[in-house]
Image (cartoon, helix red, strand yellow):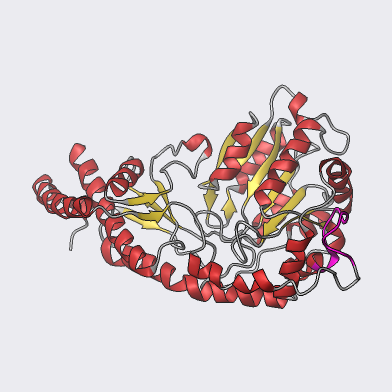
Amino acid sequence: MAKITDYSKEELKQLEKELLVQYDEYVKAGLKLDMSRGKPAPSQLDLANGMLDALDSYTTESGLDARNYGVLDGLPEMKKIFSDAFGIPAKQIIVGGNASLNLMFDAMMRFMVFGTEGYTPWGRLEKVKFLCPAPGYDRHFGITERLGIEMITVPMTEEGPDMDMVEKLVAEDASVKGIWCVPKYSNPQGICYSDETVKRLASMKTAAADFRIFWDNAYGIHPIFEDVEVLNILEEAKAAGHPNRPLYFASTSKISFPGAGVSFVAASEEMIAEIKGVMTYQTIGHDKLNQLRHVKFFKDAQGLKAHMQLLADAMRPKFEMVLNKLEKELADTGLLSWTCPKGGYFVAVDTLDGCAKETVRLVKEAGVVMTGAGATYPYKNDPKDTNIRIAPTYPTLDELDKAMDIFCLCVKLAGVQKLLSK
């Protein structure tokens, strides 16, 4: 069977007619389906409902009253869970509130206002630039853009960011102050950084002495099909002589409750002291009762990972459905390519050049809300207009089945119309 991209003009016109008939039926059905963001489904959240009744007391093992003031950097018991789960010494961890995004924004603001290690605050510099591997996480790009930092797009490869390009940029330009990284099951492609990539990031020569790696390990313990080991950036940077370079972030947002999880930032001991030196003016400490609730529910790192396995078992059928639909409907068409993630929260697809926005528009008109095309690139500017992020977790299986049928149909329709326009 010939690929659709090889069809004659007459064959394309006939196919367009058939697709439009199917599309009009979906539009008339008035469906309202949501695949817009990587939100846990209510059924996933229900698995953690026991946490709501976990507080049988208000005191920690050491006798600390979690209802009161104090403990700037978090409960020792919560730090131990994160320490054991992520392989980071507890003394290098600060426990935050429900969102690691908040900790990332705070870190960026500290560098802008106060600088780091005595260097000029970034906000006083004429120009500050940040490397943004793309496709990537739209909220990272949103923080950087909001603060007026120039974003430089770095292409993603199967092993992580294009390190030849990264090393060249950081070596020749002192205004390049950092890079965003989602090292494990990256958002949205599900890429895991190779050992070589991590080591090169940790050891590369930078023109800026205060260059920082924002290591957002959001999916560090989120396997679905296979658990992939990614090197610890804190250990690698220390071994390479740049211990202060990385700031490491993660949270339980997609393990317990997104609205009431627990996050952390980890760094070298020197950087932890620097962060606490500013934090002490900002807060007396984050929600310790919520931390204690998590401690009593998960008990230890093994409990945290066991719960994540329950979530993986719940998500796996949804990812399988997405991948099976793409394979069945689009594998031999030439209209779409996609990643097959081993974990994380998303499936990334690439349409024909110039078809992503039109595909998302068609999908929306047919009753399915998706993340906007272009969102996975700095300034929402996907230069080829090809990348779309599929977020399969929130809909039920029945809803996802309908949504994927609509999506595949719209990929075909947008692709055929693009081919006809040439």
Instruction: Name the side, left or right, on which 348 lies relative to 115.
Output: left
419 or 61, which lies in front? Answer: 61
Vertical placement of residue 83 versus 6, above or below = below
Q: Residue at x 79, y 64 (%)?
A: 88
Q: x, y percentage for residue 410?
A: 26, 51
Q: Residue at x 54, y 48 (%)?
A: 136
407 or 171, which lies in front? Answer: 407
Instruction: Name the side, left or right, on which 85 lies relative to 329.
Output: right
Q: Where, quadrant-wise, is the N terminus in this rendering?
A: bottom left
Instruction: Name the side, left or right, on which 303 lies relative to 339.
Output: right
64 or 33, which lies in front? Answer: 64
The reply to whether the magenta stretch includes residue 68 is yes
- Asked where in the image residue 141 lies, by quadrant, the reply is top right
Q: Which residues are magenta?
A: 64-77
Q: x, y percentage for residue 71?
A: 87, 56
Q: Residue at x 41, y 62 (%)?
A: 395
Q: Which secondary structure dominates the residues rendered in magenta?
A: loop
- Asked where in the image residue 160 lies, by quadrant, the reply is bottom right
Q: Where, quadrant-wise, is the C terminus in this rendering?
A: top left
Vertical placement of residue 116 versus 312, above or below = above
Instruction: Name the side, left or right, on which 336 lies relative to 273.
Output: left
Vertical placement of residue 404 versus 387, above or below = below
The reply to whether the magenta stretch includes residue 191 is no
Q: x, y percentage for residue 73?
A: 84, 55
Q: x, y percentage for residue 29?
A: 21, 55
Q: Residue furthest top?
A: 126
